[in-house]
Amino acid sequence: MKQATFAAGCFWGVEYAFRRIPGVVDAEVGYTGGSVRNPTYHNVCGGRTGHAEAVRLTYDPEKVSYAALVDAFFAMHDPTTPDRQGPDVGSQYRSAIFCHDAEQEETARAAKERLEKSGRLRRPVVTEIRPAAPFWRAEDYHQRYHEKHGGRCAI
């Protein structure tokens, strides 16, 4: 099993989308890329910790490639909007790929370049590609949120 970490806006929908991909064994939501240890949802939403809402995947590379996960990541959100996805605004909603090794970084950078050159997008891709940072698991009520609440947002 391998891990992959992505940030693509509100983590509830991102987690749900990744869980539906065959070969993804587990997905958990949390916070990464910031400077505060053990951040809470309310800390991160305040926009002062530097964290992104993110999803850490455990996947079986014999069933799904990292490249396929990166392609799914780019398809599930708008990678051209800095610090925003839909109505969610702030650096915690930025588009980012947190790479766990050099191979993941190479794959992510190549996919970003292909997307930029494809002509499908009218604006530049702003997705950050950086080394994986400490991942802080979000509070239990955020885990599998869509499954618990039928996709409705209660917070």
Image: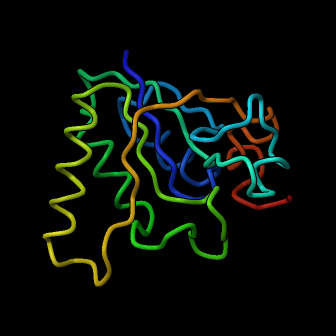
Q: State the image coordinates of residue 142 (x, y, percent, origin top left).
A: 75, 42
Q: Nearer the viewer, residue 20 or 126?
A: 126
Q: Position of residue 150 (x, y in %)?
A: 72, 54
How many callouts does the rendering have?
A: 0
On the rendered image, what quadrant is the N terminus found in?
top left
Where does the image place residue 71, in percent across and percent down from the top left?
28, 51
Tell me which colouring the rendered structure shows.
Answer: rainbow
Above or below, comparing residue 72 to residue 37 in the picture: below
Give me the residue at 36% from left, 35% from top: 22
Image point (35%, 61%), residue name: 75
**Left or right placement of residue 42 versus residue 91 in this view:** right
Which corner quadrant holds the C terminus? bottom right
Residue farthest along the bottom direction in this orientation: 122
Horizontally, residue 15 falls left or right of residue 130, namely: right
Name which residue lies at 63% across and 38% down: 29
Q: In this picture, is 108 found above or below 86?
A: above
Residue 77 position by quadrant: bottom left
Is residue 114 found left or right of 100 in the rendered image? left
Which of 94/152 is in front? 94
* Residue depicted at 64% across the width and 46% down the height: 51
- On the image, which quarter does residue 153 sit in? bottom right
